Image (cartoon, rainbow, N blue to C red):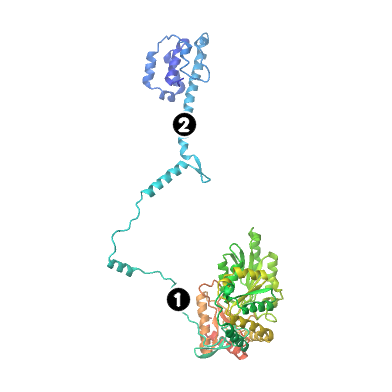
Amino acid sequence: MHQPTDVDMVEEMCAVESLTQDSPKDILRQCLEYFGADFQSKIAISEVNDLLESTPLISTPAPLNEFEPLITLDKEPPSILSVKGENSRACHAEIMDTVASAVMNIMNTALYWLTVAFDAPYARAVVFGVHISGHLIVEALLAVAIFFLLSRKSYKPSERSLSEKEIDELCEDWIPESLIPPLTEEMKYEPPVLESDAGPHTIINGKEVVNFASANYLGLIGHEKLLESCTAALEKYGVGSCGPRGFYGTIDVHLDCEARIAKFLGTPDSILYSYGLSTTFSAIPAFCLKGDIVVVDEGVHWGIQNGLYLSKSTIVYFKHNDMDSLQSTLEKVTLENKRAKKLRRYIVVEAVYQNSGQIAPLDVVIRLKEKYRFRVLLDESNSFGVLGGSGRGLTEYYGVPVEKIDIITAAMGHGLATEGGFCTGSARVIDHQRINSSGYVYSASLPPYLASAAITSIDVLEENPDLITKLRGNIAVLWEGLSDIPGLSAASNPQSPIVFLKLKKSTGSLKNDLQLLEDIVDQVLKEDFVFVVASKSSTVDKCRLPQGIRLFVSAAHSETDLLKASESLKRVAASVLADYN
């Protein structure tokens, strides 16, 4: 059954004209008025004229079966017989409704397909699990991009080779990038060169000077027993070990030294490192891993800074030796980080800070450690052999049990007048480093004579506790002599072996401050033969504490040495800082 057209509908209406009082022209006019312009647009004018001319004024009613193939409606159209006797107006209204329904069906169908055609480019799609609107547009853009890339011409180097002259010109014009940064005046500075041992007195440029630049705290450099111990070890073992500890580089004197240090400090075990700085370089990354949280004092020395950098841990600094800042930092890290309780957490401090001479309040650190459940790594490089009644370091100084400290590291070049470093603690802490610490596993082991010297130094310290008493007396004398030094003030702890002098009034520039301090240091050495150093930071050192003059006090210094140093510094400082002040 074919779909009826608008012309067919009009023919049907005209065919039943005889049943009504209206002519076919009137019926057509009513259709046009009823449906309006939309109906007119579907029937050509020529079709209307042909229809009107072919329709008789008085038409014979057609049989009902002639109308069935012409219109398909929702309901059967009224038959001619049923129309007879009915009111012609009612029949006319019903026919108009039927035609209107057919036309609306056509319009709805056309509108549906028009909507589909319009929405197709913006239809939603799922690409790799992501819902994308307008996927046809995206696909069209991708097709354009692919076509663009494929149509581009590939690069073809010139087939013509360069002449010798052109090559020479290019080589002359080429300026290679420097492998190192440009040298500044500060980098060109050469420190004084020692021409003898770094004892309380040394020789620089052929002249004897009082040495306050070497960390020879107990005055054991050149000690007779150390020289005898080193000589015997050299005759027995030679100079070097020629291998890492795990690859036939372990000698019995290494094990003896580790046991001696552990016994002296009261810890279960210890481990030796070949170099003092490599102790923190290696011990910190062995325990602090990526993702761990490390809360560290902003004034730690470069060895600790580098160890933290190698660990790739999350580093959080607190203000230098400020326990209120430490507590607020621990609280912030613990409360704000929801995963903090599931991570390893450490506090890293120095016993005696090399960059300021301050002493860490270990009792407060331990209290905060236990409150917030952190581990503590303590560097005792400048306190081992110095603090405490017998020189056992900061734990003895504060009366804190050594087992409360998780990891203790120290360099042996300060208090023991030898070289290398050690880490001490529980057996698990030490065993872990023997297989995970890069400085222990891959570096050649400590030369045997240095390990022997370390053992002898601890023996001398235990046999001569008055060395510590003498050191403390010398520190007090120097502090008293520098109490009224013009333009400078002592910023270190009165019991620290490092006396740190800083400018009372900064110039506002680190470079200018350092220049003033170096002028004082140079004049003191040149005029009074007193060797002190300015705390000049290297380019890799990230410590931003105020710069100053650093004096390392030794038990071997005489009272005359101490008074000479204090008087010289006061006189030169007054002269150099007079114009500035």
CB-based contact (under 8 Å), mark 2 and mark 1: no
Q: Going from the N terminus, do you reach mark 2 or mark 1 first?
A: 2
Which residue occupies 50% across, 90% down? 206
Tell me the residue that label 2 is attached to.
Answer: 113
Say whether residue 300 is visible: no
Q: Is residue 340 visible?
A: yes
Foreground pick, 436 / 172:
436
Residue drawn at x 64%, y 67% is 346
Indicate the amino acid at tag 2: Trp
User: Residue 571: horizontal and vertical position, in percent?
Assistant: 55, 87
* Position of residue 115 measured from the top left corner of the image (x, y, whole percent): 47, 34
Q: Vertically, is 117 above or below 451? A: above
Which picture quadrant has residue 309? bottom right
Side of 173 where 104 appears, left or right:
right
Q: Nearer the viewer, residue 170 or 263?
A: 263
Check the image and report above or below for 323 versus 192.
Answer: above
Q: Which mark is residue 393?
A: none
Above or below, comparing residue 539 to residue 14 in the picture: below
Q: Secondary structure at mark 1?
A: loop
User: Disc number at residue 184?
Assistant: 1
